[in-house]
Image (spheres, rainbow, N blue to C red):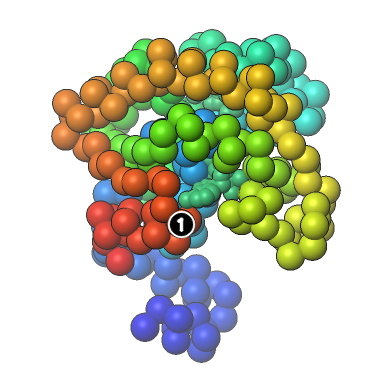
Amino acid sequence: FRSSLNFSLGRIEVQRVKMLYGYFYGGKHMKIIMLGAPGAGKGTQAKKIAEKYSIPHISTGDIFRANIKNGTELGKKAKTYMDQGLLVPDELVVDLVVDRVKQDDCSNGYVLDGFPRTIPQAEALDKALAAMGEAMDYAINVEVPDENIVRRMSGRRACVDCGATYHIVYAPTKEENICDNCHGELILREDDKPETVQKRLNVYHEQTQPLIDYYTEKNILVEVDGTVDIDEVFAAIVNVLGA
Ligand code: ADP
Ligand code: AMP
């Protein structure tokens, strides 16, 4: 039904149909958090969710990387932590996300990727939403054991221009080292080098994993197996969010 509409209508009409679709089919209940270890596939799935349900994809990692690229003060501060595989302090990230979710394009929902990463971040988010009479709807935990993570990260390639991510084996580009989207150059992220990945995993277990219990208690946790193919992981998510 939707694809036949896309076919016969112009661009603006398609946008309008998508907004109405979001409004009637659960768009108001699409405030989603992606949880999981670094490299579990949060970004990969968040992009697919954002596209399917026409909601913004908000990645704090992407926001920091864009700030680093543009040489902003925030970027300079964040880089010192990111390069070491450490989390950026809560006070540098909370307001940024809270301001972002208040923007108009978030009215039908959004998918948070890489935030919250600590209990204080989760509490600050809940408090800000409660003040608006809102709450998160789903926390989707993409489960991948540590053994698989290092292989995932060493093969991940990111586009320097548009931020698209690929994997040399699991999600290859059409042309080697050239972004399918924008023809930008692909790089191995500095923090994806094996020595930093182990540190990021430790940080994840200490500071971020407790969020699984936090969202279980809030009754919004959804667990998906992240070790299967990208499309299979997505199918499991759609099964929960609705087709
Ligand atoms: P995260 O956002 O959780 O750090 P990414 O979405 O960037 O993780 O995924 C990490 C790497 O693993 C990327 O190179 C991505 O292409 C690849 N990847 C993601 N999901 C899968 C999957 N289900 N199977 C195999 N590789 C995957
Ligand atoms: P990501 O792209 O999500 O893997 O994030 C890359 C890096 O950015 C992380 O290792 C952290 O240093 C930093 N970062 C991203 N999101 C957050 C967050 N919510 N809290 C603290 N640091 C973050």
Q: How many badges with numbers are in the image?
A: 1
Q: Is mark 1 within 8 Å of ligand 1?
A: yes
Res. 142 visible in picture: yes
134 is higher (above) or lower (below) than 204 = below
Q: Is residue 178 above or below residue 125?
A: below
Local crowd size for mark 1, using a 10 Å CA cut-off: few (<14), some (14–19), many (≥20): few
Q: Residue at x 56, y 20 (%)?
A: 198
Instruction: Assign the C terminus to one quadrant of the image.
Output: bottom left
Q: Is residue 193 left or right of residue 128?
A: right
Q: Is residue 73 visible?
A: no
- In this rendering, the answer to whether 24 lies above or below 59 is below
Of residues 23 and 86, the one drawn nearer to the viewer in this rendering:
86
Q: As drawn, is 195 to the left or to the right of 33? A: right
SS under mark 1: loop
Q: Residue furthest front?
A: 147
Q: Position of residue 164 (x, y in %)?
A: 66, 49
- Identify the residue position indicated by label 1 in the image: 229
Left or right, residue 79 beside residue 99: right
- Quarter occupied by residue 226: top left
Q: Position of residue 199 (x, y in %)?
A: 57, 16
Q: Position of residue 212 (x, y in %)?
A: 29, 27
Closer to the camera, 125 or 153?
Answer: 153
- Give the answer, above or below, for where 111 lies relative to 192: below
The structure residue drawn at horizontal position 44% and vertical position 86%, both measured from the top left corner, is 4
| Quarter of the rendered structure image containing ligand 1 | top right
Q: In which quadrant of the rendered view does residue 180 lie? A: bottom right
Instruction: Say which quadrant the N terminus sits in.
Output: bottom left
User: Residue 179: x percent and y percent?
Assistant: 76, 55
Between residues 224 and 222, which one lies in front from this camera angle?
224
Q: Which quarter of the figure has residue 194?
A: top right
> Which residue is pictured at 68% across the width and 51% down the height?
168
Q: Amino acid at mark 1?
A: Asp
